[in-house]
Each structure stands twice: as structure tokens, then as C-alpha cells.
């Protein structure tokens, strides 16, 4: 069973962190939100959740999150996913449909499958972390920020936290992202019930591409002008305001 925590009272909202992160990413955000029952869940190999088994997949991660919700008897909910957490959120929407997963919020995430170049990069990362995990982490995390020098304590915390992960967990999570399936059909299915919160300076996700697909499927799209991939840190007040706006009442 994945590690998780339930807090607050109101409509259930599931929060799923990104790659190399943990539930600590929500610690400052949740107290600023009201009217929700927050279920924060750590994915396999992240935080205090058990390490993943071989052949990890996004489908398996979604099933493990759903197991937590079933245990807590949470039948209907919304889900907020950051980066990798967004991939899992989209898969939950695919597995459960709108009847149970009522609303999806993608925070710096997207529905597209990896390009062949990106797949090759993921495979290389999986190889690198087995021999030099620290080098990869110390290079990858600052690159997630528009201006990492503006957030030295947050960058240091993320690096420290990621270093606690095993090389195998990082490699298996990387390969799961490489092998995920496209989820544009979920964007279409959810329509106005899906929201994208995107950093304009996100080096991993072109905002023009996200604006185009959200317009095509009538999803909600919010562009944060001063943020990169870590919008919840770089544009904290804006993200909190949007999450409160998107929270079910």
C-alpha cells in the first residue's frame, strides 16, 4: 500500500506529486485551501512509499492510488497531479471515468506520449542513475525552475529529498514515464472538467502546445507568466488561487 495522509473535511481531492518529489510539496498549499478533504499520496519509490517492482507502469501507479481510495471508501473525488502525478491522474480518469473521478487538474503536466528523442533520453537517465544518482539529481532539479537561484532553499530541499530515493526507484519511474500511452482522449472526454495550470517558462512542456490542445477540447487553461515547471513554488499565490477555484464545493 502506498503511503498517504488524509486531512480536512469537505469534498475529496486527491493530490499526487511529481517525479523525485513527495507529499511535502503540498505542505504549504493545503493549509491555504478550504472546503476539501485532502488525500495526499506518495507514488511507488517516492517519500515513504514502498519501492516499485520491476516493469513499473503508469497504469500500475494509477491502480495503486485507486487502492488507497478504495480503502478509505472514497467513491467520488477530484484529482490534482503535478508532472508525473498528472500522468497518473489522466490514467485514473481513463480507468474510472467521470462517474468517479469527477475533475482532473494538471499542474505542469500534459497528455502527450514521449517523442523518440525523449524516450532515448529517458533510457539514458535510467542507465545514469544506476552509477551516478547524485549527479543526475543535482543537474535535473535546478533545471525545473525558471530561475533556480531565486529559490535556493527549495532547490536544496528537493535535492536532499530526491537523494533518499533508490537508484532503482528512479530508473523504474523514468522508464514508466517513457512507456506511457498518449492520453489526449482523456482531455477530450473530460472537456470543461479538466484544467491545465502551466508555467510559461516550463522547459519540459511547450505552453503553446498545451494551449492548442486545451482549446481543441474545451479544457480550462491557465498560463502563469513567471513560472517554470515548479509553478507551485514559483507562482505559489496564483496556484493556490487556481486550485481553490477548481476545488469542488
Image (cartoon, grey):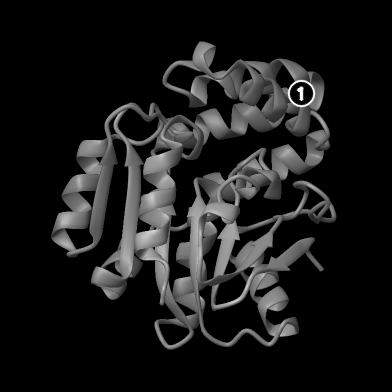
Tell me if mark 1 has few (under 14), some (14-19) or many (20+) residues whose alpha carbon lies within 10 angstroms of its own: many
Q: Residue at x 53, y 28 (%)?
A: 121
Q: Is residue 22 above or below residue 153?
A: below
Q: Nearer the viewer, residue 248 or 78?
A: 248
Image quarter (top left, top right, bottom left or bottom right) of the C terminus? bottom left
Q: Is residue 177 left or right of residue 242?
A: right
* Residue 151 image-quadrant placement: top right
Is residue 111 visible in the rendered structure shown here? Answer: no
Q: Residue at x 64, y 70 (%)?
A: 8
Q: Residue at x 20, y 46 (%)?
A: 211
* Residue 57 image-quadrant placement: bottom right
Q: Is residue 73 above or below residue 183?
A: below
Q: Nearer the viewer, residue 151 or 220?
A: 151
Please give the residue where the numbered disc 1 appears in the rendered image: 133
Mark 1: secondary structure:
helix
Percent position of residue 191, x then y = 24, 70
Q: Is residue 70 above or below residue 175?
A: below
Looking at the rendered structure, the number of numbered marks drawn on it comes to: 1
Amino acid at each position: 500500500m502506498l503511503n498517504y495522509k488524509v486531512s480536512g473535511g469537505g469534498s475529496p481531492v486527491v493530490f499526487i506529486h511529481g517525479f523525485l518529489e513527495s507529499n511535502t510539496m503540498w505542505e504549504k498549499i493545503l493549509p491555504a485551501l478550504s472546503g476539501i478533504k485532502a488525500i495526499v499520496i506518495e507514488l511507488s519509490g517516492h517519500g515513504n512509499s514502498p519501492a516499485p517492482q520491476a516493469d513499473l507502469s503508469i497504469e500500475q501507479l494509477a491502480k495503486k492510488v485507486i487502492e488507497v481510495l478504495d480503502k478509505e471508501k472514497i467513491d467520488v473525488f477530484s484529482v490534482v497531479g503535478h508532472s508525473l502525478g498528472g500522468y497518473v491522474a489522466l490514467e485514473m480518469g481513463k480507468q474510472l471515468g467521470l462517474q468517479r473521478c469527477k475533475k482532473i487538474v494538471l499542474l505542469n503536466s500534459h497528455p502527450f506520449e514521449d517523442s523518440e528523442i525523449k524516450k532515448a533520453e529517458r533510457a539514458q537517465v535510467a542507465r545514469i542513475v544506476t552509477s551516478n544518482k547524485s549527479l543526475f539529481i543535482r543537474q535535473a532539479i535546478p533545471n525545473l525552475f525558471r530561475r533556480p537561484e531565486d529559490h535556493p532553499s527549495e532547490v536544496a530541499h528537493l535535492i536532499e529529498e530526491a537523494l533518499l530515493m533508490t537508484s532503482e526507484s528512479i530508473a523504474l519511474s523514468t522508464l514508466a514515464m517513457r512507456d506511457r500511452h498518449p492520453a489526449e482522449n482523456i482531455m477530450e472526454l473530460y472537456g470543461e472538467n479538466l484544467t491545465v495550470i502551466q508555467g510559461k517558462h516550463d522547459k519540459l512542456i511547450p505552453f503553446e502546445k498545451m494551449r492548442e490542445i486545451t482549446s481543441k477540447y474545451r479544457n480550462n487553461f491557465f498560463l502563469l507568466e513567471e513560472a517554470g515547471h515548479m509553478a507551485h513554488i514559483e507562482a505559489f499565490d496564483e496556484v493556490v488561487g487556481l486550485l481553490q477555484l477548481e476545488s469542488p464545493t
